[in-house]
Amino acid sequence: MVLSAINDKDNKDNKDNKDDKGRNLGLSSYALSLAYDSGPDDDFTGFALTGSYATSDNIRYKLSIYSLEHSFNSDLKIDGFAYSYHGGKGFMSQGFGFYGNFGFYLENWELGTFDSYFTGYELGGGIFYNWSDVSVDWNLLNFRSSWGEYEELAGVSVTALSISLGISTRF
């Protein structure tokens, strides 16, 4: 009987300390840089609304809806979304975590009468820290491929990179 009572208390304590918060909603700063083989780079900055769902401590799905402006010509705007799969450690735990990600994006570029859609995939990784109710996520670097659409527009080879730093609520 004493062992049963100790076991019950131990199970309750472990359950109370367990953090199963696998959902996040937040806001991120977001940047996209297009580096060309020749000529100046194009840099865009803005914000993203983010939502994610972890199915376990090692798997998470994330959606980011972003809005960006060109660093020199604020009339050139990009609106888009990115959906990604994250494999890593610590999504449903408190403390530091890390991940690698693979996903797809769709974005619309607008400048005056110019209006064009770009799609592609991205591959990257990041680190994060989870507190009980808040998380900070730094998506260190995403390499993007546009299936030649950026290159077709620019007429030269393009390396596209995105990065974000965000804060979210966990529930």
Image: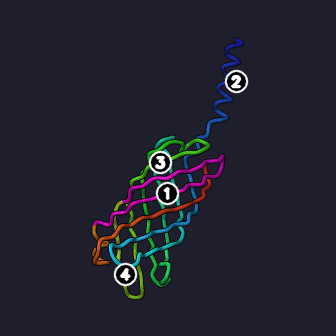
Residue receiving disc 4? 115
Q: Is 133 drawn above or below residue 79 in the view shown? A: above
Residue receiving disc 1? 140
Residue 4 belongs to the span the image colors magenta: no
The magenta-colored residue range is 122-147
| Residue 99 image label | 3
Lower position in the chain sequence, tag 4 or tag 1: 4
Q: Secondary structure at mark 3?
A: strand
- Residue 71: x %, y % from top left: 50, 78
Residue receiving disc 2? 9
For marks 2 and 1, give the one nearer the viewer. Answer: 1
Q: Secondary structure at mark 1?
A: strand
- Residue 72: x %, y % from top left: 49, 82
Instruction: Specify the amino acid type for callout 1.
Output: Leu
CA gap, disc 3 and disc 4: 34 Å
Lower position in the chain sequence, tag 2 or tag 1: 2
Instruction: Specify the amino acid type for callout 2.
Output: Lys
Q: Is 1 drawn above or below residue 32 in the view shown? A: above
Way the structure is coloured? rainbow
Q: Give the residue displayed 27% in from the left and 75% down from the top.
A: 152
- Residue 26: x %, y % from top left: 58, 59
Instruction: Specify the amino acid type for callout 4.
Output: Asp
Residue 131 belongs to the span the image colors magenta: yes
For marks 3 and 4, give the one nearer the viewer. Answer: 3
CA gap, disc 4 and disc 1: 29 Å
